Image (cartoon, coloured by chain):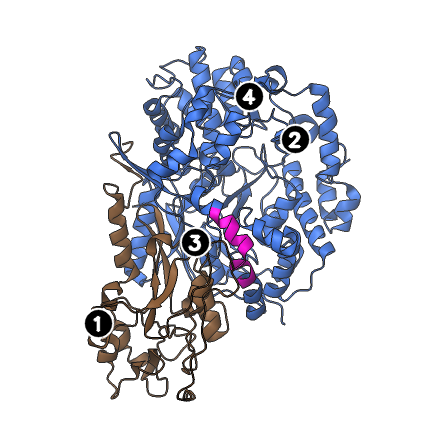
Amino acid sequence: MAEIQFRLLEVDLTHETSRAIDVTADVKKYLGARGLANKLIWDLVPAGADPLGPENILHVGVGPLTGLIGTKTILSFKSPLTGWAGRSACSGYIGEEMVKAQYNAGILVKGKARRPVYLYVWDDKVEVRPASDLWGKWKQETEVTLRDRLNKETGEMFGVLCIGPAGENLVRYANASVEFVHSASKWGCGAVMGSKNLKAVAVRGTKGPAYADHRKVWELFKTYATSPITALRKIDESRWGHTTSMPSLLRYAGEGIKNNHLGYHEIVEKSNHLEHNLKYFAWTDGCPGCAASCFVPFFKNSERGAFGGEIRHDNCGGFNANTMMDFEKMTEVSSLENELGMDGEELGGLVAWAMDLYEHGIITREDLGGIDLRWGDVDATCALLKKIAYKEGRAPAALAEGYRRAYEVFGEQSRWYAFEVHGCAAPTYDIRNKKVGNGLPFATSHNGARIGAGVDIALREAATACSFAIPPFEQIWGSGEEAIRVFLNAACGWNLTTDDIKDISLRDYYFNRCISLREGYCPSVDDQLPPRAFDETITDKYGKKWVWDRAEFEEQKKIYYQHYLNLTEKGLPPREGLARLGLDFVVPVLEPMGALD
Amino acid sequence: MPEAREAGKPVPEQRSRPQAEGWGKEPYPYPKGPAAIECDEMKCVGCGICQMACSMQHFGVINKELARIQVRKYLLPLPKGVQMTCVQCAEEERECQKACPQAPPAVYFDRDTLHMVVDVERCLGLSCLLCVDACPARAMRVYRAGSDTPFVCDLCDTDNSGQRDPQCVNVCPCGALSYKSISARFGYSIQDLLRKHPDEKADLIARRLYPLTKTSMGNPGWR
């Protein structure tokens, strides 16, 4: 079967021009999405560039398997929060529309528009269109208004990715979303879009996906879609979505409670997924091509008003008990987070930190613009979220910049209260709990405090393969890597071996890490846990205690680098690995910086 | 021209989801008489795997635009997948057949094979499309890049030999699609009452979320 071509849509917002580029050779080396984006960022973004300036790029990425193993779109950019390699992931219709428009390597956005714009893509018709009447709108209104307008104009239903006011105002952890509930949240992709005056990306693809062997792809895909293994997974995913991880983590000191001070508090008993499901579950919703849909939007009508949205671990996990709230309160807070357009995980840490600082008099009511920011207060929290999104008031504006910049405003005494890694909030999966085991992954992540920053996720975010969709594939084909391999060969007309897949994974992982190294990330200095991870013990409901010992952490970090991340003892990519994988071009850049062993 | 079905030969029994055994997706025997595809809209998640199966069955490629069944995503404000396909209307309500300028109509319900058929030899093609405009649900599908004539759900009896076996129903992971005997309460068909465009079905489902409006996740919310 003939190999397929990979097309990248390159859009220059400064000049409002666009062109489709053949990137097949690069996709064969790196796959797409975050893999390809490594090369784009390395080549196109000068080291030290301002992430909120026109030199930054935004890659809205898909890969050869987007729509076959779930539908994940990966946004890649230099992060305004960390200054390092940034990436966000979202699901939903935008990825599929790009694949159907046959921009199967995604959309690359460069430069900065003169005024608010949105990107309009309908197959080969690409326009940079004015968005002045959309600018300022909250997320839901933006997405609905734009979809309705384009439907009236064309009769087609576009997929839309958009930002809210937080992105427009360059909050450093502002997000973008698709179908409201699919949020590309981490590390400030929304701020990058806002800095480019890019309010939304609207895509409609009617050509259909380009596959080398449609019948073979269908044979593989149908096996997955009709498998009892998939049906079994669906039973759990389609009822509960991702509401079940929080109750289990909260009870066992696995998730932040009261700004990560506690391992248990009776409030966690009120984060009950059955209660939430029975009261408010609307229906199951899913992504293109996924046979085990995992979105469970809620609808609540109450004396306090009507609310809709979705509670998931990512948008609520680090927020609810961490700010002394529960699922009931989060139904009101979680959607506001996303209407304004900010990362719920980052906010979960920052808002809890602000409550802690307020309780201890380090920030005042005046600093907060008059808000009496008590633990668990929904109205105060919602008022604070709005002020952060609009950077109103001394404390909210500081919080909008993230922990490290906020220290300069709140003073040194605020540091001890901050539960952050690499300047990023770490409220979820309390890093002291070694059974949950995210202390080392967070601490060694070159993206900044992130679960799954390793080699296997590098492959998935290049393929793309959704981590929630992939488990049945793992069982049917023996491993995620093997499933990805057979699907790639059928879809692309390639002959990848198991070793080829291993190489691609490691190549993409190293390359992403090299971007961060080039931007000043230094594992021996930066890969640390917050002081409280060593000095403050947490105890779960049943008396089990967790805390890190400093010497133990340093020792285990070395082991983690070498055995899980294929790095040197100092957390750096090994020279022989870089050479073998065709990445030696990074050496002349990283070596003078002292960023290689 | 499709082969004439041998008179008197029974249609082999078709079962749903032949590969999926157990886990609440047991196959059920397919109806032998007039039947149509129905969707339990509240179970549909919008994955569109039905569309993939349809385009593969009829055109040998995966392309949702080439599918006779369609699933669209709406924001009500909550995201919702809404499906539509031809419901195999009774003759009195069959707007597509009535609108066809050909005599006899080029789009018709075949009484032997029991499904809609587009006779591509006699259909006037893309310059006509009166049938497409006539169906209130827009169940007659057009895709210029792939077909010179409109196409409509034929219950996967692609060569019109009497082998109905809807692939979309077979593959739906949610059990949202079913293949059922045409509603004939008291001998009267009411299929056309199910004949709604996804836009219309979406607006009806949106009523469940009153007082939320489509443009906000809160009412009065946080303003």
Which residue type carries mark 3? Tyr
> In the rendered structure, which segment of residues is drawn in magenta?
A222-235
What label does residue A249 carry, if any?
Answer: none
Secondary structure state at the residue bearing disc 3: helix
View extreme (top): residue: A361
C-alpha distance separating marks 2 and 4: 20 Å
Q: Nearer the viewer, mark 3 or mark 1?
A: 1
Q: Nearer the viewer, mark 1 or mark 2?
A: 1
C-alpha distance separating marks 4 and 3: 40 Å
Q: Within the magenta stretch, is there residue A234? A: yes
User: Of the residues under marks 4 and 3, which one precedes in the sequence?
Assistant: 3
Density class for disc 2 (Cα within 10 Å; few <14, some 14-19, many ≥20) is: many
Q: Do the residues bearing badges 2 and 4 touch, measured as CB atoms within 8 Å? A: no
Q: Which residue is mark 2?
A: A440
Secondary structure state at the residue bearing disc 2: helix
Density class for disc 4 (Cα within 10 Å; few <14, some 14-19, many ≥20) is: some
Q: Which residue is mark 1?
A: B187
Q: Which residue is mark 3?
A: A93
Q: Nearer the viewer, residue B41 or A42?
A: B41
Q: Report in which chain the residue with disc 4 lies.
A: A
Where residue A53 sits: x, y (%)? 50, 39
What label does residue A540 carry, if any?
Answer: 4
Q: Report in which chain the residue with disc 2 lies.
A: A
- Give the residue drawn at x 54%, y 49%: A466
Look at the image and tell me whether residue A186 can be seen: yes
Dominant secondary structure (helix, strand or loop) of the stretch shown in magenta: helix
